[in-house]
């Protein structure tokens, strides 16, 4: 069975400092992994996705994530945080089996950016 | 301007009342999904539809119903059988089932 674990429920950084949001996955197959961002009372926006091509995936707004099979990790990073990055971030793995290949969501990491 | 729209943004339900949440997409996607989001939890799948006139239960379908009469539309009804309906409801679509999903802005349902 597939699952994801987001290791931090809350992360706080200062504006201009690096961001690291951690995600570990479990999958019996070569996984498809995603990061979505959700601003307050908004829908989810796709940041980036990994589908077994390059292990370093670049997304929107300066975010990137590295797929590390040996560590079963897919951590999200950004070199320099901006106030507008304050939001909730979800790590997601695509499940396999059945008709849906449904998405399995982590519980989210709330990122706070201090001025 | 392509995308997914959900209405209303906020919805209030009285005891014993059924309410319907709207989801429309103009992306020409075959597959559509409904999720429920509660604080501190990830999204949970309520129902999904692979194609017009077809839909399947997700992980938490009890107390909900859907229809898919048109490709563009996938309304969700929260029935009186759903005892804890207060949540944020998100609709999504993908080109085909299993492809990358894109989300609407959500509807927040509150119980009076």
Image (cartoon, grey):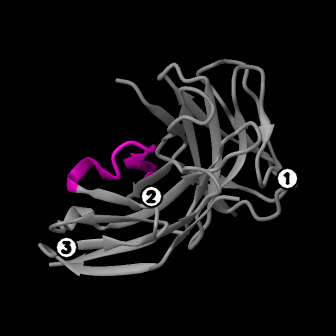
Q: Where's residue A83, x and y in %? A: 19, 67
Q: Which residues are magenta?
A: A41-62
Residue A111's disc number: none
Chain containing the residue with disc 2: A
Disc sitting over residue B62 in the figure = 1
Tell me what residue is drawn at x 41 percent, y 57 percent.
A38
Q: Residue at 52% of width from left, 27% of height from top?
A: B25
Number of other residues with Cα within 10 Å of mark 1, as a class: few under 14, some 14 to 19, many 20 or more: some
Q: Position of residue B23 (x, y in %)?
A: 58, 34
User: Dots 3 and 1: beta carbons under 8 Å?
Assistant: no
Q: Quadrant of the N terminus of chain A?
A: bottom right
Q: Secondary structure at mark 1?
A: loop
Q: Which residue is depicted at the point 76% across and 29% down?
A: B67
Quick check: is B69 in the magenta stretch?
A: no
Quarter of image, res B99: top right
**Quarter of image, res B31:** top right
Q: For the residue carrying disc 2, how many other residues have a C-alpha within 10 Å: few (<14), some (14-19), or many (20+)?
A: few
**Vertical order, A70 against B43 (above or below):** below
Residue position marked by numbered label 3 in the rendering = A18
Proximity of marks 1 and 2: CB atoms separated by less than 8 Å: no
Q: Chain of mark 1?
A: B
Q: Nearer the viewer, residue B112 or B103?
A: B103
- Residue neighbourhood size for the residue with mark 3, other residues' Cα within 10 Å, grouped as few (<14), some (14–19), many (≥20): few
Q: Label 2: which residue?
A: A41
Tell me how far mark 3 sits from mark 1, CA to CA.
Answer: 43 Å
How much space separates mark 1 and mark 2, taking CA atoms? 25 Å
Q: Are marks 1 and 2 on the same chain?
A: no
> Quick check: do tags 2 and 3 share a chain?
yes
Same chain, marks 3 and 1?
A: no
In the picture provided, is B68 more to the left or to the right than A43? right
């Amino acid at each position: 069975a597939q699952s994801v674990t987001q290791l931090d429920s809350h992360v706080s950084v200062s504006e201009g400092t690096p961001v690291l949001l951690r995600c570990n996955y479990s999958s019996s197959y070569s996984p498809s992994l995603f990061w979505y961002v959700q601003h307050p009372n908004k829908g989810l926006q796709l940041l980036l996705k990994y589908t077994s091509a390059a292990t370093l995936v670049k997304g929107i707004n300066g975010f990137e994530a590295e797929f590390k099979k040996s560590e079963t990790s897919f951590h999200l990073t950004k070199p320099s945080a901006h106030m507008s990055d304050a939001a909730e971030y979800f790590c997601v793995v695509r499940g396999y089996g059945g008709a849906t290949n449904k998405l399995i969501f982590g519980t989210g990491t709330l990122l706070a950016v201090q001025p | 301007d392509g995308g997914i729209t959900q209405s209303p943004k906020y919805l209030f339900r009285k005891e014993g009342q059924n309410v319907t949440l709207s989801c429309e997409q103009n992306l020409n996607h075959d597959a559509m999904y409904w999720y429920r989001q509660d604080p501190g939890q990830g999204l949970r799948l309520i129902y999904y539809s692979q194609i017009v006139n077809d839909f399947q239960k997700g992980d938490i379908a009890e107390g909900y119903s859907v229809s898919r009469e048109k490709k563009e539309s996938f309304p969700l009804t929260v029935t009186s059988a759903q005892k804890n309906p207060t949540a944020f409801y998100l609709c999504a679509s993908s080109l085909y089932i299993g492809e990358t999903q894109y989300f609407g802005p959500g509807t927040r349902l509150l119980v009076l």
